[in-house]
Image (cartoon, rainbow, N blue to C red):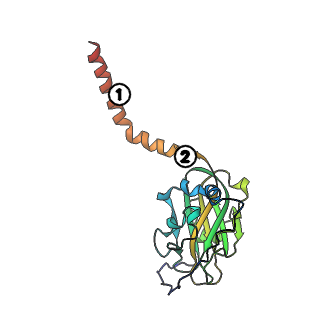
Amino acid sequence: HGHSHGGGGHGGHGGHGGGGCAHEHQDEPELVRGAEWSLYKEIDTTGVRCMNECVAGSALKVLKPYDQRLTTTECIESAADEQLIIYIPFTGCVKLKSICIIGGRSGESPKQLKAWINRDDIDFAMAESAAALQEWDLQENFQGQIEYPTKISKFQSVLSLTLFIPENFGAEATRIYYIGLKGEFRMHNRVPVDIVYEAAAQPKDHAVAESSKNQAGTHNT
């Protein structure tokens, strides 16, 4: 459906006091759990995009370390309606095991999630019609205790992840405070960088090679 992305301001969402629950995971220290959720370090931050966000650049701020998942100073808020598309490229190839999303209260949390990998062409029209690689029905997850596992066989070689949120729990706008990605980093994707480097650096390389040859010649005489 049509997205007229005029920034309709969504009036005062008062302070959401998140009651701290520090002791859910006594079996696993915070540090261990945090390490499992460290794929945020492998995100290519220059390429992260979000469609229908109120404030440009918000998506990057919710892709943060696990131990900061309950901070609510930064969020993505949807603009024209409740839908969001978030594109997350990685600096290499990752295996994605599960996803965690912390959303807003008062119906602002995402209710559904669809995901694609290695596609940079998903827009709202396509997201509604194209078959997703996986879909999840989400629950409101204010403490970040719920994670949604991927069908791991389909998420083995992920270079980029596209997330589509079609609806929330009834609010005008969707708010997201944290997106956590659990998985393993497999390898750096150096090929495009090398191609760019080769093309840019060749003339200089040849010049250096020539001058060192000349120098070698003068030393020999």
Q: How many marks?
A: 2
Q: Secondary structure at mark 2?
A: loop
- Residue named by callout 1: 209
Near mark 2 (Cα within 10 A), the count class, few <14, some 14-19 or many ≥20, is few
How far across and down, in percent of the image, does residue 197 sit? 43, 42
For badge 2, the amino acid type reads Asn
How far across and down, in percent of the image, does residue 1 sit? 59, 78
Using the rendered view, name the quadrant where residue 62 is placed: bottom right
Q: Which residue corresponds to the image point at 33% horizontal and 30% vertical from the top-left?
A: 208
Q: Secondary structure at mark 1?
A: helix
How far across and down, in percent of the image, does residue 147 sit? 69, 65
Quadrant of the rendering where the C terminus is positioned: top left
Q: Is residue 185 above or below residue 142?
A: above
Q: Nearer the viewer, residue 137 or 71?
A: 71
For badge 1, the amino acid type reads Ala
- Residue named by callout 2: 189
Using the rendered view, name the quadrant where residue 87 is placed: bottom right
Q: Nearer the viewer, residue 24 or 79?
A: 24
Mark pair 1, 2: CA separation: 28 Å
Q: Which residue corresponds to the image point at 28% horizontal and 22% vertical from the top-left?
A: 215
Q: Farthest residue toward the bottom?
A: 11
Circles 1 and 2, Cβ within 8 Å, touching? The answer is: no
Instruction: Describe residue 17's horizontal placement relative to residue 219 as left or right.
Output: right
Please give the label number shown on residue 196: none
Q: Nearer the viewer, residue 181 or 163?
A: 181
Q: Earlier in the sequence, mark 1 or mark 2?
A: 2
Q: Is residue 123 visible?
A: no
Q: Is residue 22 above or below residue 38?
A: below
Instruction: Describe residue 160's horizontal placement relative to residue 154 as left or right.
Output: left
Q: Is residue 92 above or below residue 103?
A: above
